[in-house]
């Protein structure tokens, strides 16, 4: 396990699902954790689980698509926990439909949360991360980890908005790595395959079977599988890894 003691991580969309598991996994490695979701009170269970691991936790109500709310959240995290070393852009939504029938609203909603939300938090944490220095003045920087998706790499019928947002997240990850690398801020993406969660529970049995047929490991992923990859990217073992997309998909692609 990575040693994240003394570090502070901020995870978006962490009331449940993959985000909640990432928050707990980083807490197991010793980081203090700030989490946010649309409503702070939705985060209560995750906060309790984090505190039970003996580290500090703070929850914020934030719509990741709203610039002022994102900036206020980052300010609040620094006031409460002192710094931000690890940023995990996890909040995401789907509004599926064939592109010929997709409404402007469904396109905008998904792009705003998944892609603009990732941009807004990346922009907001860049400066505080640049200020992270050791007592000797060494640039400590930080680690930004964006949650993309296998379909952002391969496309998927019925998900024009979602696949475009996740493909955008991958391109944004690579650009962020190039712009902030000189400050020792690394930026990588994790691209999950089919992970058992509320987002995928709603799919029909037919759709689930069709996915299963494409997975060499013959099981759907667990939220823990994603959290483990994020924890590795957040820690010093990945100190020379930036601008990469780590696929965690059971071999789907
Ligand atoms: P989920 O729906 O269980 O959790 C998403 C969380 O984000 C929820 O707590 C929700 O309230 C929050 N959220 C939504 N809109 C928000 C906003 N505007 N501001 C703040 N919080 C907001 O989804 P799940 O499965 O845990 O997904 C997490 C991430 O993983 C998403 O980015 C998703 O696209 C990605 N992903 C999930 C896969 C899966 O199979 N479940 C596969 C590939 C990627």
Image (cartoon, grey):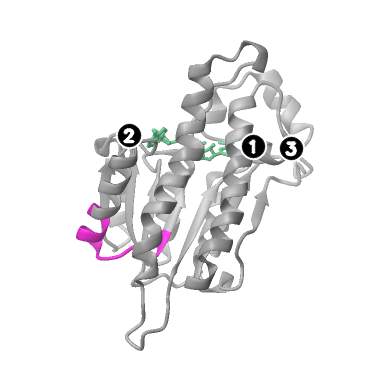
Of label 2 and label 3, which has the lower sequence position? 2
Tell me if 66 is positioned left or right of 88 in this view.
left
Question: Of residues 120 and 149, which is closer to you in this image?
Answer: 120
Residue 246: in magenta span: no
- Dot 2: what SS? loop
Image mark count: 3
Residue 194's mark?
A: 1
Residue 38's mark?
A: 2
Q: Is residue 234 above or below residue 240?
A: above
Queried on whether the Cβ of the residue with tag 1 lies below 8 angstroms from ligand 1, the answer reads yes
Q: Which residue is mark 3?
A: 154
Q: Is residue 8 visible?
A: no
Quadrant housing the C terminus: top right
Residue 80: in magenta span: yes
Queried on whether the Cβ of the residue with tag 2 lies below 8 angstroms from ligand 1, the answer reads yes
The quarter of the picture where residue 44 lies is top left
């Amino acid at each position: 396990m990575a040693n994240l003691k003394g570090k502070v991580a901020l995870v978006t969309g962490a009331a449940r699902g993959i985000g909640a598991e990432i928050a707990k996994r980083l807490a197991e490695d010793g980081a203090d954790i700030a989490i946010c979701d649309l409503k702070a009170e939705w985060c209560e269970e995750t906060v309790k689980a984090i505190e039970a691991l003996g580290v500090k936790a703070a929850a914020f109500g934030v719509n990741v698509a709203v610039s002022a709310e994102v900036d206020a959240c980052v300010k609040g995290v620094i006031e409460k926990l002192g710094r931000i070393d690890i940023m995990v852009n996890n909040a995401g939504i789907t509004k599926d439909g064939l592109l010929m029938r997709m409404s402007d609203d469904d396109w905008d909603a998904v792009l705003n949360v998944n892609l603009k939300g990732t941009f807004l938090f990346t922009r907001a944490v860049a400066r505080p991360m640049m200020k992270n220095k050791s007592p000797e003045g060494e640039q400590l920087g930080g680690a930004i980890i964006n949650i993309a998706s296998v379909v952002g790499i391969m496309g998927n019928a019925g998900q024009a908005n979602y696949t475009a947002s996740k493909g955008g997240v991958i391109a944004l990850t690579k650009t962020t790595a190039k712009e902030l690398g000189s400050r020792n801020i690394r930026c990588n993406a994790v691209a999950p395959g089919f992970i058992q969660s509320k987002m995928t529970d709603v799919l029909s049995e037919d759709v689930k079977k069709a996915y299963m047929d494409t997975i060499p490991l013959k099981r759907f992923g667990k939220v823990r599988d994603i959290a483990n990859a994020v924890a590795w990217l957040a820690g010093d073992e990945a100190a020379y890894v930036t601008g990469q997309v780590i696929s965690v998909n059971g071999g789907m692609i």
